[in-house]
Amino acid sequence: MHVNVYEKFWMWGAGGIIVVFLSATLLAGVVQGRTPPSHVETIDPATVFTDARFAERGVVRRPDGSVVVTSIALMFAFQPNEIRVPAGAPVTFRMTSPDVVHGFQIVGTNGNTMVVPGYVSQFTMTFDEPGRYLIVCNEYCGLGHHVMSGTLIVEAAQ
Ligand code: CUA
């Protein structure tokens, strides 16, 4: 079968682009360890409020200066609703949902994760600028989705 030289050019070109994209994805995921902002930690959505990991919500400061924020996203609020963290310290957010999929987006920063029932979402980031940040749910979760918000207050480091 005769294949036109231009057709060959585009066939091999398109194939090559696919190989390049797949390689880039594999390289980023496997070699550089770039993964979605979470890790595989499961939790029973029915027992979130009594689970030892989420029985106490709030901000805990570790001896090394880092901070852990434990939070639950539920219809239609975040618990706790107001989060205070120090500027300049690594802050690890740990979140889950007892009902449906929610979002947790710290507006104006790249802090953003889905909160999926059955899983613990976790990401770590450092806030350099003290200030007030709006937290919104960015996954449609029901009739009260548009009122589901919270506040993050970054306080100047002492
Ligand atoms: Cu929670 Cu939208």
Image (cartoon, rainbow, N blue to C red):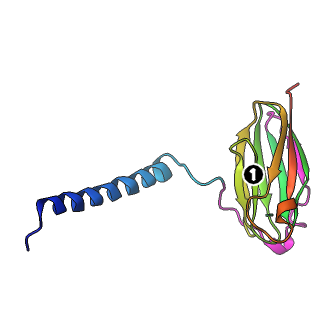
* 1 lies above or below 107: below
Horizontal and vertical percent for residue 16? 28, 56
Give whichever of 108, 102 is nearer the camera: 108
* 35 lies above or below 154: below
* 147 lies above or below 107: below
**Is residue 107 magenta-colored?**
no
Q: Is residue 53 visible?
A: no
Query: Label 1: which residue?
Result: 105
Q: Secondary structure at mark 1?
A: strand
Name the residue located 83 percent from the left edge and 31 percent from the top edge: 130
Horizontal and vertical percent for residue 21? 39, 54
Give whichever of 138, 52 is nearer the camera: 138
Regarding ligand 1, which quadrant of the image does it lie in?
bottom right
Image quadrant assignment for residue 143: bottom right
Q: Which residues are magenta?
A: 38-66
- Taking the view exactly as shown, the residue that stands out farthest to the top is 158
**Is residue 45 magenta-colored?**
yes
Q: Is residue 64 visible?
A: yes
Could you tell me which quadrant the C terminus lies in? top right
Horizontal and vertical percent for residue 29? 50, 53
Horizontal and vertical percent for residue 35? 57, 53
Name the residue located 65 percent from the left edge and 57 percent from the top edge: 39
Name the residue type under label 1.
Gln
